[in-house]
């Protein structure tokens, strides 16, 4: 069930990204560049995935440290 939910979310992100492929100007701190909305959506989703995995690992290690 979890894998099906993840696949649905990935498909929705891909469809949204391809429908919004126009280039936009991005300014973040000292960086300024132009990229398509699809690339930005992909990078944001990837950053969220990585942050979630790191958070899950930290929480798992704290829980396992308590049980020892």
Image (cartoon, rainbow, N blue to C red):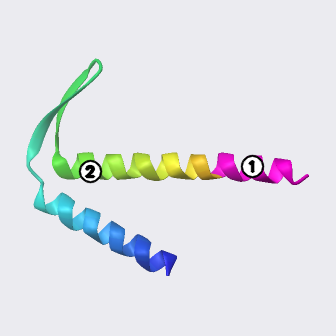
Crowding near the residue tagged with mark 2, few <14, some 14–19, many ≥20 C-alpha atoms within 10 Å: some
Q: Position of residue 21 (x, y in %)?
A: 12, 54
Give residue 14's quadrant in the image.
bottom left
Judge whether residue 65 is colored magenta.
Answer: yes
Report if the CB atoms under discs 2 and 1 are less than 8 Å apart: no
Residue 61 - label: 1
Judge whether residue 44 is colored magenta.
Answer: no
* Closest to the observer, 32 or 1: 1
Residue at which label 2 appears: 41
Residue at image coords 20%, 53%: 38
Q: Reading the chain from its start, which is encountered first: label 2 or label 1?
A: 2
Q: Position of residue 7 (x, y in %)?
A: 39, 74
Question: Which contiguous range is marked in magenta?
Answer: 57-68
| Between marks 2 and 1 in the image, the one whose residue lies nearer the viewer | 1
Residue at image coords 42%, 46%: 47
How many marks the image carries: the answer is 2
Asked whether, in this view, residue 39 is left or right of residue 24, the answer is: right
* Closest to the observer, 52 or 34: 52
Residue at image coords 34%, 67%: 10
Asked whether, in this view, residue 59 is left or right of residue 40, the answer is: right
Q: Is residue 38 placed above or below 27 in the rendered structure?
A: below
Q: Position of residue 51 (x, y in %)?
A: 50, 45
Secondary element at image label 2: helix
Q: Residue furthest left?
A: 22
Dominant SS of magenta comes to helix
Crowding near the residue tagged with mark 1, few <14, some 14–19, many ≥20 C-alpha atoms within 10 Å: few
């Amino acid at each position: 069930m979890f894998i099906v939910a993840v696949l649905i979310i990935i498909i929705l992100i891909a469809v949204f990204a391809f429908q919004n492929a126009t280039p936009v100007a991005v300014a973040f701190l000292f960086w300024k560049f132009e990229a398509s909305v699809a690339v930005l959506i992909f990078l944001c989703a990837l950053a969220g995935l990585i942050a979630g995995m790191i958070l899950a690992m930290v929480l798992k290690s704290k829980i396992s440290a308590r049980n020892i």
